[in-house]
Image (cartoon, rainbow, N blue to C red):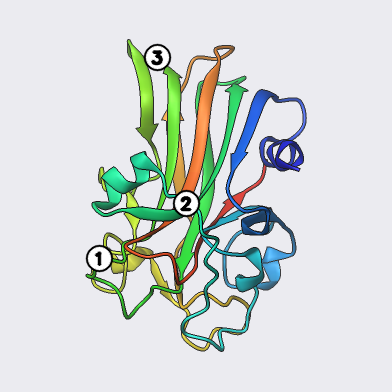
Amino acid sequence: TPEEMVQFFVGSGINYSNVLYTGADTARGIFTNGGTTNLGIDHGLALTSGTIQNIPGPNNNGSSGASNGLEGDVLLSLLAGVTTYDACILQFNFVPAADTAWCDFVFGSEEYPEYVGSSFNDIFGFFVTGPNPAGGDYEMLNIALIPGTDLPVTINNVNYMSYPEYYVNNEYGQTIEYDGFTTVLTAKCAVVPGATYHFKLAVADAGDDIYDTGVLLEAE
C-alpha cells in the first residue's frame, strides 16, 4: 500500500501522516537486492510513468513503455516546459528529527539516449513545503536538482551531452532495462526539527505518454 511504501522509505521511528498516492498501482512499488545491479542503490521506492515491470534487466529493448492513460502534473509540466502525462505521485507529511532532510535517488528512462534534446523531456520532482530555517516557508520547492545547479532532473538536463558526469549509458546493461540513468544523486534541504513538512515525490512522461521513465529512491 502507499502507507507501507512511506514506512519503508522513511524507516523506523520517523513520524509521517496523510499519505496520498496518485497514479496507476502498477507504476509504483518497493525494491530490494539493488546491490546486485549497477544502480548504486540497494533498496527503496520505485515510482514510474509506466510500470515497475520495465525496470529489471537485461536491457534488451530500446523502447519499453506502458501508457496508463492518466493525466500529468502541473508542477512537473512547468519545470519540463511541455505537457506531462501518466504522473506517478506519492505525497505525505513528515516530521524530521534533525536539521536536514535528504535522500539519494537514481532517475532512469527509455527516452535515453535517442530523444535527448527533443520535446520528450520526462522529469522527476521532489517538492517540499514547510518552514524554512532561514526564514519564511518553502512552497513546493523542488530539491531534486542536478548537483551545483538549480536545474530539475529531466531527460534534456542530464544526459550524455549535458552534465555527462551524472549520466550512465546502460546500453546492453545486464541488470536494468532503462537505456540510461543518472548516477546516484541527492535531494536535500535544511529543515526545522520537530516541524511538519509536506513531501511530494512525482515522476511523469513529458511530451507523450509512451516510453517509460522512473525514479528509484533509497529507503531509510
Q: Residue under circle 3?
A: 133
Q: Earlier in the sequence, mark 2 or mark 3?
A: 3
User: Are dots 1 and 3 in contact, CB under 8 Å?
Assistant: no
The Cα–Cα distance between marks 1 and 2, rounded to whole angstroms, is 16 Å
Q: Which of marks 1 and 3 is nearer the N terminus?
A: 1
The answer to whether residue 71 shows anywhere in this view is: yes
Query: Residue 64 at what x, y percent from top left?
Result: 52, 78
Query: Residue 106 at what x, y percent from top left?
Result: 50, 58
16 shown above or below 183: above
Disc 2 crowd rating (10 Å Cα; few below 14, some 14-19, many 20+) is: many
Disc 1 crowd rating (10 Å Cα; few below 14, some 14-19, many 20+) is: some
Q: Label 1, secondary structure: give it.
A: loop
The Cα–Cα distance between marks 1 and 3, rounded to whole angstroms, is 37 Å
Q: Residue under circle 1?
A: 119
Horizontal arrangement in the rendering, residue 3 relative to residue 127 (left or right): right
125 shown above or below 30: above
